[in-house]
């Protein structure tokens, strides 16, 4: 099966997604194309990175994932092919593959534009670079024919900071559509600390104690600490929006107190 997923911030009104599909279907007629979403917030490579984390690893071996959230299109930023044991990832070097780097062994390659067609638009690499590269991979061509080893990889992920024996500082990595605040602290890291049960977070007038298992462990509208579906620590509000009630944004920090 030749399978491609598409994740973009293009929307569906302007035909940009259709152009990419046309390139794929014209050259690989038997390809199956899966639209993940074209409603990523404009330029939000962080949102795209989390979306990719949520679905990419679930697909069959040899799936090609094309991700085009590309505010730096036409600049000196590189285009990438990231190859893992199971999948290929194609897109710009702007951090959109941060969680691929974190979760899987990989080889990363920089796309050599000189090995592609000459009339490459400076504003539409999805059509003129990333889709044609996917075609060549799907056709069985060696990546080294049109790529070279990448010398630089952008990532927005940073580990949590240890302040002292009783406190660590966490950063908001992402806020999902429900207003859940997702932090750079994983269940595995919590286990490495001995799985402390009575951790606490104080934000403004709210004190959160302990890590809950489900939203139903607290009353409606109550805040809680819990693990998200990818095992990152999050602050949520049962049937509410934690980000709004706590007035926190991406990049803001909180302190997690250990017992």
Image (cartoon, grey):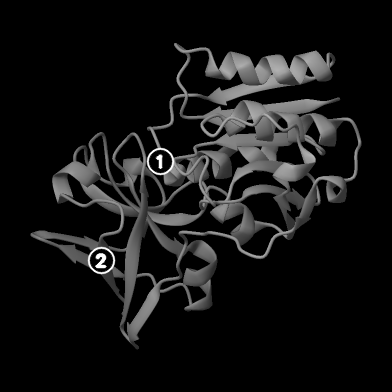
- Given residues 250 and 237, the one toward you in this image is 250
Residue reaching furthest to the bottom? 165
Question: Could you tell me which residue is drawn at 81 percent across and 45 percent down?
Answer: 146
Q: What's the mark number on residue 44?
A: 1
Which picture quadrant has residue 222? top left
Above or below: residue 124 compared with residue 237: above
* SS at mark 1 in the image: loop
Q: Is residue 23 left or right of residue 225?
A: right
How crowded pointer 1 is (Cα within 10 Å; few <14, some 14-19, many 20+) is rated as some
Above or below: residue 81 compared with residue 259: above
Q: Position of residue 169 (x, y in %)?
A: 31, 73
Residue reaching furthest to the left? 205
Tag 2 residue: 254
Q: Position of residue 129 (x, y in %)?
A: 67, 34
Residue reaching furthest to the front? 118
Q: CA distance from mark 2 to mark 1?
A: 23 Å
Q: Position of residue 229 (x, y in %)?
A: 50, 45
Q: Inspect this view and state whether residue 95 appears.
A: yes
Question: Could you tell me which residue is drawn at 44 percent across and 40 percent down?
Answer: 71
Q: Is residue 161 left or right of residue 99?
A: left
Q: Earlier in the sequence, mark 2 or mark 1?
A: 1
Q: Is residue 257 left or right of residue 101?
A: left
Disc nearest the viewer among 2 and 1: 1
Q: Inspect this view and state whether residue 59 appears.
A: no
- Given residues 143 and 203, the one toward you in this image is 143
* SS at mark 2 in the image: strand
Q: What's the mark number on residue 83?
A: none
Which picture quadrant has residue 210? bottom left
């Amino acid at each position: 099966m030749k399978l491609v997923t598409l994740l973009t911030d293009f929307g569906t009104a302007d035909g940009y997604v259709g152009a990419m599909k046309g390139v794929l279907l014209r050259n690989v007629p038997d390809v199956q194309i899966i639209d993940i979403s074209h409603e990523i917030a404009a330029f939000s490579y962080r949102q795209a990175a989390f979306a990719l984390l949520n679905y990419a690893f679930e697909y069959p071996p040899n799936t090609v994932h094309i991700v085009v959230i590309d505010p730096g299109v036409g600049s000196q930023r590189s285009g990438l092919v990231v190859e893992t044991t199971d999948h290929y990832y194609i897109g710009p070097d702007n951090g959109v593959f941060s969680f691929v780097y974190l979760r899987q062994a990989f080889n990363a390659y920089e796309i050599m534009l000189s090995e592609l067609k000459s009339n490459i638009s400076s504003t539409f690499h999805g059509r003129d670079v990333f889709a044609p590269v996917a075609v060549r991979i799907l056709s069985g061509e060696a990546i080294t024919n049109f790529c070279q080893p990448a010398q630089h990889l952008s990532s927005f992920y940073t580990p949590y900071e240890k302040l002292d024996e009783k406190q660590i500082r966490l950063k908001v990595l992402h806020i999902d559509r429900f207003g859940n605040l997702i932090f750079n602290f994983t269940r595995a890291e919590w286990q490495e600390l001995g799985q402390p049960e009575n951790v606490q977070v104080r934000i403004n007038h709210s004190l959160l104690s302990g890590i809950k298992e489900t939203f139903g462990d607290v009353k409606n509208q109550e805040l809680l600490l819990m693990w998200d579906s990818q095992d990152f620590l999050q602050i949520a509000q049962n049937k509410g929006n934690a980000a709004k009630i706590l007035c926190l944004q991406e990049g803001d920090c909180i302190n997690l107190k250990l017992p």
